[in-house]
Amino acid sequence: LTITVGGTAHVLSVGGGSLAEVTTAINDANLGIRAAAVTTGSGFRLQLNATTTGDTSVFTIDSGLDPAVGGTVITNQGGNASITLGTGPGAYSVTSSTNSFSNIIPGVTIVARAKTAALVQVDISADANSIADKVSKLVDAVNAAMSDIKEKTAYDTKTKTAGALLGDAAVRQLSQAVTSALANAVGQSSYKSPGLVGVSLDRTGLATFDNQKFLDAFAKDPAGVQRMFVQGAATTGSVKFIGASDATQTGTAAVEVTSLATKATVSGLASGWPLAVPGPVTVRIGQRTATYNVMPTDTAANAVVGLQAAIDAAGLAVDVTETGGGLQASARNVGTGGGFDVAWDGTNFAAAIGTDVAGTIDGTAATAVGQVLTAPSTQQLFGGLSVQTDGLTLGPVGTVSYEPGLAQRLAQAIAKATDSTNGYLTVAENNRQTRMDNLDTAIAAFDIRLTAREASLRKQYTAMEVTLGNLKNQSTYLTSQFSGSAASSKSSS
């Protein structure tokens, strides 16, 4: 039994071809198809359902099934969901392999609940109370960390007991970094001071949160409040700020493009129309393929329409045009990520590969994906800073003035402290562990020397006891000899 899913054929062994064997073979193959034996009132049939959604889940099954299985019923093929935005000439449609659409408005996901031709209005508003609750939890987390630091660095005058980390420079540095992250002004926000949006420090060094002040500020200027907490950047020229990492520092970086990104493009079938040897043309991206069989009567224009229809049905981001008497296939996206393969004869594939933009950020060669440049993590000031170029301009294209908001500054402070390689808390911990290991080694070596010294002393004392025993025996012998001699002399007299 052959089942084709997403353009890939899978040959399954079904034993003797009974309904039970066919059902088991399909289910065990894990092809995204669920098989079941169902009764129709006049016998059993094989029912097949795609288990995933979207056009890429469409499957076909060969027609050579044993009549004993009672025929095949494909009840649910995959298909993309589609919604149309707007009305009139400006309306446009968007598709998705699921009922969720997250590529329409940044940060917003629209879920289609039912099919309808009637207009549906979607109202979007920020939930200020929910955001305030998250800020409150952030403040609570800061206070929990600061309280833990205070406990471990305190000195109890009553018990005369010092905390385990009293006087530790790394912990003091962390405390200062967290305090600065909460207290310092944020220039990118219209409010500037965190206190104006409800976040402050009390005289003990702990953070406080004024929920009502936050809600009032948010109602007045939500964008200003947002910029108080998140990453932000002012740009000049033709660059757009994309994002930054926890290692990116505040400052202004110049961006230069040394090479523009290109689309993957490949041409073929330029031998004249109609083709002397018509046949299939296949376009492939990964496991997804699209094939159009060129007919003997096709013109280049006919072939463009037919091949493009097959490509669109397969969901491939490739466009086909007529050029130079033949056909040209081009990726819709620039860069290496838009690459694809084409077999103009249906068999021998040729790779079409684009190139990514090349350039520098603050004078350092950047990594690139498509038209996005990212400063390498090794760059001291702007590591992780990402910008998008316009794809049209070479040379100096602008600047990015980056500034992290309050929440981002906290993330940076923690990352700088806890980085697994260079974090100052990590380094301090490793140094302490090294000292402990050295002490353990020294103690172990001293134990060896002590044991050897003990053995030496025991040996010497044992020898001394033997010598003293011999001396005592000699003394006793001499005493007895002198006593006997004296007695003999007295008797003779």
Image: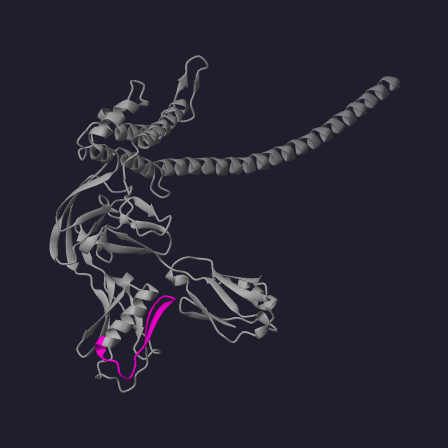
All told, the count of numbered labels is: 0
Q: Is residue 468 left or right of residue 295?
A: right
Identify which residue is drawn at 86% across, 21% down.
488
Identify which residue is drawn at 50% across, 66% down.
73
Q: Between residue 268 and residue 42, name the one nearer to us.
A: 42
Give residue 198's position: percent from left, percent from top: 26, 25
Residue 291 shown in magenta: yes
Q: Is residue 159 left or right of residue 485?
A: left
Give residue 153's position: percent from left, percent from top: 38, 23
Span highlighted in magenta in the image: 281-301
Which residue of the protein is positioned furthest toward the bottom in this rendering? Answer: 276
**Above-or-below relation of 161 to 334:** above
Residue 469 visible from this viewpoint? yes
Give residue 239's position: percent from left, percent from top: 16, 50
Give residue 424's position: percent from left, percent from top: 34, 37
Identify which residue is drawn at 16% across, 58% down.
391
